[in-house]
Image (cartoon, rainbow, N blue to C red):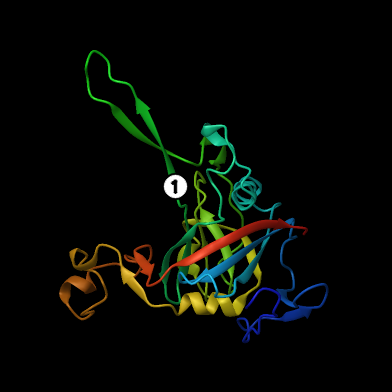
Amino acid sequence: SVIGDAPPRRALLGVAVAVVSGAGSPRVVRAGEPKITAKCALDIRFGYDKSVPLRRLTIGLFGEEAPVMTKTFLQACSATYLGQSGREGYAQYALSTVRSVAKDRLISFADFPGGNWMLKVTSPIMGGMVNETRIPLAGPETKTAETNSLRHDVVGRVSMTKGGGTFNFLITPVADASFLDSNNVVIGQVLEGFDLLEDMNNIQTVLKGGPLNLFSGDGPGTKLAKSVPENANDYLRAPFGKIKVSKSQVLAP
């Protein structure tokens, strides 16, 4: 949806739902959902043409269900994470891009413009070579063993990898994404922008690695393709055309 428009949602998965009215667009909710403790708005644009209107994706976070991961998410949403750099702005969803789109499976965020790591340079000793080490932007305080009983059983579930230690997150474009339950922790739910979510799900993709990657889906009947797990390329399908988060901000819950 263009920012401010209400998202028309097709029967959101065959469970009891209600449309709650209030300030701004209506949103679809499901009875019995956890408490939303914070919201993050991602204003997204397709392509490189800046005249194309921004479209908003609003995410409600379940802070009581995954306190460490939701804190990490909010810090990237608000660009307030300090980490090992000691400076704000290194890790922020604003100006990041979608990493991968696996149709009807998952949408993976976020590639930061400067990379998802810092480069630590160690000076040479006695004429030796300069040593460069990549350090993840997400510091040790973002790691966690937390989990919960929430499942990827609603269109628009938001989750992060078990164990934490990353700013990357997934959004499910379908109601049944149970294949993610074993390795991901649900931290939130899309509240607005379901039409935008569907458009991202349907975008054309190109396989990272090109012809060097033999598991591109071409020739699914081949013996080689049959031996590859169904999700082998979920994180390798780059959108054909940029999907960029132009702005991110924390909203009142």
Query: Residue 223 versus residue 102: which sits nearer the camera?
Result: 102
Above-or-below relation of 69 to 215: above
Name the image quarter holding the N terminus. bottom right
Q: How many marks?
A: 1
Furthest-top residue in this view: 126
Q: Residue at x 78, y 58 (%)?
A: 252
Residue 134 visible in the snapshot: yes
Q: Residue at x 61, y 47 (%)?
A: 79
Amino acid type, mark 1: Asn
User: Which residue in the protein does label 1 denote?
Assistant: 116
- Report the side of 76 relative to 26 (left or right): left
Res 240 → quadrant? bottom left
Q: Residue at x 60, y 41 (%)?
A: 81
Res 204 → quadrant? bottom left
Image location of residue 19, percent across then percent down: 76, 80
Query: Residue 95 versus residue 161: which sits nearer the camera?
Result: 95
Name the image quarter holding the C terminus. bottom right
Image location of residue 30, percent across then percent down: 71, 74
Image location of residue 110, percent across then percent down: 48, 57
Furthest-front residue in this view: 51
Q: Residues within 10 Å of mark 1 (few under 14, many from 20)?
A: many
Above-or-below relation of 232 to 202: above
Residue 175 visible in the snapshot: no
- Report the side of 69 relative to 99 (left or right): right
Query: Residue 147 versus residue 208: which sits nearer the camera?
Result: 208
- Report the side of 82 relative to 214 (left or right): right
Image location of residue 242, percent across then percent down: 43, 68
Above-or-below relation of 188 to 92: below
Res 99 → quadrant? bottom left
